[in-house]
Image (cartoon, rainbow, N blue to C red):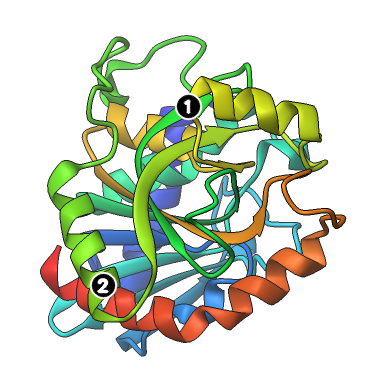
């Protein structure tokens, strides 16, 4: 089965389950951030495991549900948990969920993630609104036989992260009392954390924060014409910046602390974007 056939099958299943809901905005929640979703009206929760062709989330802090609902008149869909390259999924398969969202009607994508910071001004609990990225995964979900149904093979990334959406996010962060700034996301494969030497190299390249996701989703979204806002919550400083070991448990613990502020931020963004 081609990926286009897979995506159409998944979209048809979801349209039937939601009675052609047609969400406008999608949100992907990062590690430990699933509890930040504001209460939605007309909520429909569908486990990834029941969606034909969908991958499964295996990482703690990623619940594995697709949630449809309405917030103050805006139709939304939330990916409660994402899929990572380091889980062993083929890179090209990371495109399935985003392309399915496009077929459902999504026009704007909010990508959230927990990250390590290389900027001393962005400490744990602060927000990096992404303005660009560096793909250090040495792979790309768009490699392979090109299907024009998903968009052009060659496309511009001079504004991968929508400028107007970034401005709205920074203003919203200020309103809810979150320390925020713009920066560049570097995507590493994981699952291990980076070494101190790698962090120093990434800083020299111009990266602000580092993580193990985001970029594959953004590449697929931009190819098919979805506008993107990247929200990277700092859970730790990059390895070697502070003299203490890193752990996934620390990531989850730190993101839990900002759930309330992230919820308030989303309440603003869902209305203003």
73 horizontally vs 256: left or right: left
Instruction: Return the x and y of residue 253 as percentages of the image width and height.
Output: 71, 75
164 horizontally vs 46: left or right: left
- Residue displayed at 49% across by 40% down: 208
Does residue 82 show up?
yes
Query: In the figure, 167 relative to 161: above or below?
Result: below
Quarter placement of the C terminus: bottom left
Report which residue position mark 1 lands on.
Answer: 206
Figure quadrant of residue 146? top left
Query: In the figure, 238 relative to 266: above or below?
Result: above
Does residue 2 show up?
no
- Local secondary structure at mark 1: loop
- Local secondary structure at mark 2: helix
- Residue displayed at 32% across by 59% down: 26
Figure quadrant of residue 180? bottom left
Nearer-the-camera pick, 58 or 264: 264
- Whichever of labels 1 and 2 marks the residue nearer the N terminus, that label is 2
Report which residue position mark 2 lands on.
Answer: 174
Give neighbour class at mark 2: few <14, some 14-19, many 20+ (Cα, 10 Å): few
């Amino acid at each position: 089965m081609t990926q286009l056939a897979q995506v159409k099958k998944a979209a048809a299943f979801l349209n039937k389950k939601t009675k052609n809901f047609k969400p406008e905005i999608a949100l992907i929640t990062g590690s430990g951030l699933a509890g930040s979703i504001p209460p939605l009206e007309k909520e429909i929760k569908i486990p990834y495991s029941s969606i034909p062709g969908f991958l499964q989330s295996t990482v703690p802090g990623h619940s594995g549900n697709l949630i449809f609902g309405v917030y103050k008149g805006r139709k939304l869909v939330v990916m409660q948990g994402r899929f990572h390259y380091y889980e062993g999924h083929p890179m090209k398969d990371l495109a399935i969920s985003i392309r399915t969202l496009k077929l459902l009607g999504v026009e704007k994508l909010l990508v959230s993630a927990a990250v390590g910071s290389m900027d001393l001004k962005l400490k744990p609990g602060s927000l990096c609104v992404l303005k660009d990225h560096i793909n250090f995964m040495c792979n790309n979900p768009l490699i392979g036989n090109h299907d024009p149904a998903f968009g052009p093979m060659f496309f511009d990334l001079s504004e991968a992260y929508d400028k107007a959406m970034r401005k709205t996010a920074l203003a919203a962060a200020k309103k809810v009392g979150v320390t925020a700034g713009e920066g560049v996301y570097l995507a590493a494969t994981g699952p291990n954390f980076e070494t101190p030497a790698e962090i120093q190299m990434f800083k020299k390249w111009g990266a602000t924060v580092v993580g193990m996701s985001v970029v594959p989703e953004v590449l697929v979204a931009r190819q098919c014409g979805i506008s993107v806002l990247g929200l990277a919550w700092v859970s730790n400083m990059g390895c070697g910046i502070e003299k203490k070991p890193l752990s996934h448990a620390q990531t989850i613990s730190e993101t839990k602390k900002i759930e309330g502020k992230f919820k308030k931020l989303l309440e603003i963004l869902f209305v203003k974007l």
